[in-house]
Amino acid sequence: MYCPFCRNPDSRVVDSRMADDGSAIRRRRQCPECGRRFTTVETTSLSVIKRSGVGEPFSRSKVINGVRKACQGRPVSEDDLALLAQEVEEQIRSSGAAEIDAHEVGLVILGPLQKLDKVAYLRFASVYQAFESLEDFETAIALLRQEAEEDAKSTPAKGAKSSEKSPL
């Protein structure tokens, strides 16, 4: 690590701390030559391999921009998009792979987006999965309805008494 002040190629680590979310390590360093201190942040690299075969670093902002188009006119805030991008990145990093296909990133986006907003999910899926007919939409909508019915059956109805106490 070169000192950013005097360009000395050596430095000594004075302090190391893990970032709050555990995704990076912050190191405080001191240059033995000039004595000045500086901070470095170490993260694992995650590359996305595009269809063309070119790799580029994973970017939450690209996830947000892609999903933002599907969420246009929907009640989805910027904070919701940031949380979605964080969840996508965490899922990808948890796989342990250093490289991931762009197509796989899109598949990972579908899950959190479906929980966030069903209409935005359909918009994103229609482009991402290349819907070509009304039947493709009907199939996707039927799956969403089926999942909603299963969720309704597995959760108690509103106003139904439960033997468990509420955590609130």
Image: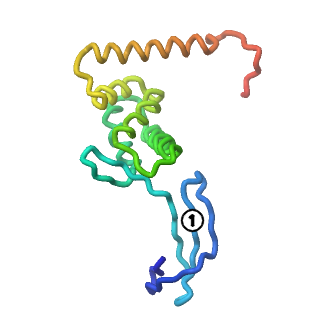
Q: Does residue 46 appear to the left or right of 16 in the view shown?
A: left
- Residue 65 pos. (x, y %): 34, 43
Judged left or right of residue 17, residue 67 is: left
Residue in front for this viewpoint, 49 or 165: 49
Q: Residue at x 41, y 23 (%)?
A: 118
What is the total number of numbered labels drawn onto the structure image?
Answer: 1
Q: Is residue 56 above or below residue 161?
A: below
Numbered disc 1: secondary structure = strand
For label 1, count other residues whose C-alpha is less than 10 Å away and answer few (under 14), some (14-19) or many (20+).
some
Res 164 → quadrant? top right
Q: Nearer the viewer, residue 160 or 53?
A: 53
Q: Residue at the location (43% across, 84% down)?
A: 7
Residue 12 position, x and y percent, is 58, 80
Name above or below for residue 22 compared with residue 94: below
Q: Position of residue 105 (x, y in %)?
A: 39, 40
In this view of the protein, which residue sits in the foreground, 121 or 99?
99
| Quadrant in which the C terminus is drawn | top right
Question: Where is mark 1, residue-wise?
Answer: 26
Say how the picture is coloured.
rainbow
Disc 1 marks a residue whose amino acid type is Arg
x%, y% of residue 124? 33, 30
For image coordinates 38% across by 27% down, the residue present is 121
| Vertical side of 11 occupied by 168: above or below | above
Q: Is residue 91 above or below residue 1?
A: above
